Every structure is written in structure tokens, then in C-alpha cells.
């Protein structure tokens, strides 16, 4: 059983350091253009590796659990966006209109993959179903996120062409993803053997996108435009959104009659949002000057969901262990039970 961690991990600290670096030493001018080109290549490589890591078995596995997978997708792409819209008046007062758009973008993102599966395993949940649900969420998110972003942002007067967004996603994200999955038959074993090294490629790509995005935002006056107390309000808004989502997914999984193992999948895969997918998608969808504002809520939400879900995973694990301890031990044939 893992110990719940209440302190940020090294990756979150690196993200925070990248934001600080961009705030004091933003990249500008021709160098910024060069960074944009490098970032585009890094994002393509990131999704190429995502495609190479996704096994064919995880795509087709779990078909018999279609009710669970549909419930997870509904939570990710329907429930959370609706909560974001319904809580709009409150969130706008807490964080201001610009950061609220970032919260709406957060709401339409797919679920995480690695952390959802890891936490499901710790909580003794249905790991194969978690693999299938999280992978499906990320695959469909390539299409659904730009469409939903266009819809929810248009409700707040922000012009966002869904067709144009989908075209950009297809060219810059989906094609590398498909190419990576096709190449899996040749490089799959190498990718599986070098997971640690490739994790640095993944995280390095995200840090590069964050640095480039925040540099342009800082040059455009990001910190001067944010209202005072916006970060505190953003923490509160994220906490409200995360708490409601976990509460509703827990309640609905029990109403649907899911087992404890499937409830774990519903809670962890249906309540979390992917930083690894969200930052590159924001870079593709939005103008460079606003990307920093759009991903700031996601960066904070990322750490909050990891901390809270780690606590929940340990609680689920303790309950499973207690249930196993209380279960009667079956008597083997030919064995005389004690006291007989």
C-alpha cells in the first residue's frame, strides 16, 4: 500500500519552476518562433510515443464492460463539462472570466492513463477495465475535446471553430498517434523496455510547451491581467469541481450496481483530467498568448487530483483487506475444520 503524499512530486515542482522561469526569463522574438517549431515537433513525438505504447489488446479489451466504459466516458465528457457550466457564476466570481475559460477547457479534457491505472491497482480495483476506460477516454478525447471546447467556449462569446480545431488535432496529434500505433509492431518491445527514458521525453515535451506558452503569456502581460487573489480562488474552484465529481461518480456507480472493483474504475477514471494530453491540445487549439491562462487551472487540478485520489486509493485498499480478513476461509476437501 502506498503512503498518501501531500507534498508536490518532482514533476509538479518542475512545472512550477518552468512557470517561474518563464515569468522572469520569457523567450521572445525570433527565438520564440524557433521554440514554437521545436514545440510542434516535441508534441508530435509525444503523441507518436502515446500511440506506440497503446497495445491493441487494451483497445479491444473489456468490451463486455461496456456499461462501465460508457459511464466513465459520460462522466469525463458530459458530467464534468455540465458541472463547469452550471458553476459558471460562482467560478467567475472566484477567478475572473479569463481563468474561468481555463476551467471550462479543463472540464472537456480526457482522463489520465498512467495515474488512473496505478491508483486503480493500489485500490485493488478492476485494472483491465481501467486500462480500457482510460485508453478509450484519451483516444476519443482527440476528437471530442476540440468539439466540446468549441461548444462551451462559444456559450461565453469565445469564437472557436470546431472544424478548424479538429483539422489541427488530426494533423498535429492524431496522425502521429496513429503512426506510432502502426509502428508498434516494430518498436513496441523497445518502447516497453525503455519506459523510464521515454517518461523523460513525455515530461520534457510538456515542460517545453509550458515554458513556451507561459513565455508568450508573460510577454502579453499575464500576471498584470490576473485579478488579485485569483490563484486562491482557483484552488477553491478546483476543489469544488473535484469534490463534486468524485461524489457523483461514487454515488452513480453504486446506483448502477457496479461491484467495488468497478466502482474504483468509475471514480478514478471518471474524475481525473490529463495534463499530458491537455497541454499539447491547448497549444494546438489556442493562440499562444492565451495558452498559459488556459492551462493554469489544469496544472493546479493535476496535483490536487493526485493527492485526493491517493488518499481514496488507500482507503479502498484498506476496505478490501478488511473484507478479505472477514471472509470465511473455505475448507479444503478431506480437511477437518478446527473443533470438529
Image (cartoon, rainbow, N blue to C red):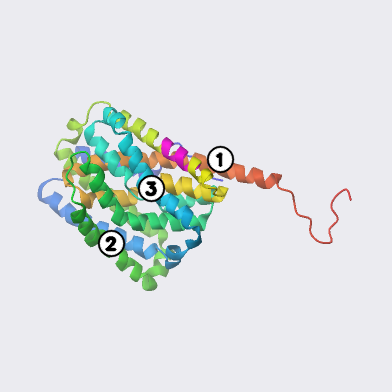
Q: Please identify the dominant SS of the magenta region.
A: helix
Check whether the beta carbons of the residues at disc 3 and disc 2 lie within 8 A of each other. no
Q: Is residue 65 left or right of residue 235?
A: right
Which mark is drawn over residue 274? none
Real-space Cα separation, disc 3 to disc 1, in angstroms: 23 Å
Q: Residue at x 48, y 51 (%)?
A: 118
**Of 65 and 277, the residue lying toward us:** 65
Real-space Cα separation, disc 2 to disc 1, in angstroms: 37 Å
Q: Residue at x 28, y 44 (%)?
A: 105
Q: Which residues are magenta?
A: 243-250
N-term mark: 2 or 1: 2
Q: Is residue 179 visible?
A: yes
Q: Residue at x 47, y 45 (%)?
A: 267
**Of 332 and 212, the residue lying toward us:** 332
Real-space Cα separation, disc 3 to disc 2, in angstroms: 20 Å
Query: Which of the 4 quarters of the picture holds residue 237?
Result: top left
Q: Residues within 10 Å of mark 2 (few under 14, many from 20)?
A: many
Q: Residue 308, percent across and down?
A: 46, 38
Q: Tell me the residue that label 1 is attached to.
A: 315
Q: Residues within 10 Å of mark 1 (few under 14, many from 20)?
A: some
N-term mark: 3 or 2: 3
Query: Which of the 4 quarters of the picture holds residue 135?
Result: bottom left
Q: Residue 223, percent across and down?
A: 20, 33
Q: Residue 270, percent across and down?
A: 43, 47
Q: Is residue 115 visible?
A: no
| Residue at the farthest top position | 228
Q: Residue at x 45, y 36 (%)?
A: 6
* Tag nearer the camera, 3 or 2: 3
Amino acid at each position: 500500500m502506498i503512503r498518501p503524499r501531500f507534498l508536490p512530486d518532482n514533476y509538479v515542482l518542475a512545472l512550477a519552476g518552468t512557470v517561474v522561469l518563464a515569468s522572469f526569463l520569457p523567450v521572445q522574438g525570433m527565438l520564440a518562433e524557433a521554440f514554437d517549431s521545436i514545440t510542434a515537433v516535441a508534441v508530435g513525438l509525444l503523441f507518436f510515443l502515446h500511440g506506440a505504447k497503446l497495445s491493441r489488446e487494451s483497445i479491444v479489451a473489456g468490451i463486455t464492460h461496456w456499461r462501465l466504459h460508457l459511464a466513465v466516458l459520460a462522466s469525463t465528457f458530459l458530467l464534468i463539462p455540465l458541472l463547469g457550466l452550471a458553476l459558471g457564476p460562482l467560478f467567475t466570481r472566484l477567478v475572473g472570466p479569463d481563468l474561468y475559460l481555463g476551467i471550462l477547457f479543463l472540464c472537456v479534457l480526457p482522463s489520465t492513463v498512467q495515474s488512473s491505472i496505478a491508483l486503480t491497482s493500489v485500490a485493488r480495483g478492476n485494472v483491465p477495465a481501467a486500462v480500457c476506460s482510460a485508453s478509450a477516454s484519451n483516444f476519443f478525447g482527440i476528437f471530442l475535446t476540440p468539439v466540446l471546447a468549441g461548444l462551451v467556449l462559444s456559450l461565453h462569446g469565445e469564437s472557436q471553430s470546431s472544424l478548424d480545431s479538429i483539422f489541427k488535432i488530426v494533423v498535429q496529434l492524431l496522425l502521429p498517434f496513429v503512426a506510432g500505433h502502426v509502428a508498434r509492431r516494430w518498436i513496441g518491445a523497445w518502447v516497453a523496455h525503455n519506459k523510464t527514458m521515454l517518461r523523460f521525453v513525455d515530461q520534457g515535451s510538456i515542460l517545453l510547451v509550458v515554458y513556451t506558452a507561459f513565455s508568450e503569456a508573460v510577454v502579453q502581460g499575464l500576471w498584470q491581467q490576473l485579478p488579485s487573489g485569483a490563484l486562491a480562488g482557483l484552488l477553491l474552484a478546483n476543489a469544488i469541481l473535484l469534490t463534486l465529481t468524485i461524489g457523483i461518480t461514487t454515488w452513480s456507480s453504486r446506483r448502477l450496481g457496479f461491484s467495488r472493483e468497478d466502482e474504483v474504475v468509475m471514480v478514478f477514471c471518471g474524475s481525473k483530467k490529463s495534463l499530458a494530453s491537455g497541454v499539447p491540445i491547448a497549444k494546438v487549439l489556442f493562440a499562444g498568448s492565451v495558452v498559459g491562462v488556459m492551462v493554469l487551472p489544469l496544472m493546479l487540478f493535476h496535483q490536487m487530483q493526485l493527492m485526493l485520489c491517493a488518499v481514496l486509493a488507500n482507503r479502498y485498499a484498506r476496505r478490501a483487506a478488511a473484507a478479505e480478513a472477514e471472509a470465511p476461509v473455505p475448507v479444503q476437501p478431506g480437511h477437518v475444520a478446527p473443533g470438529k
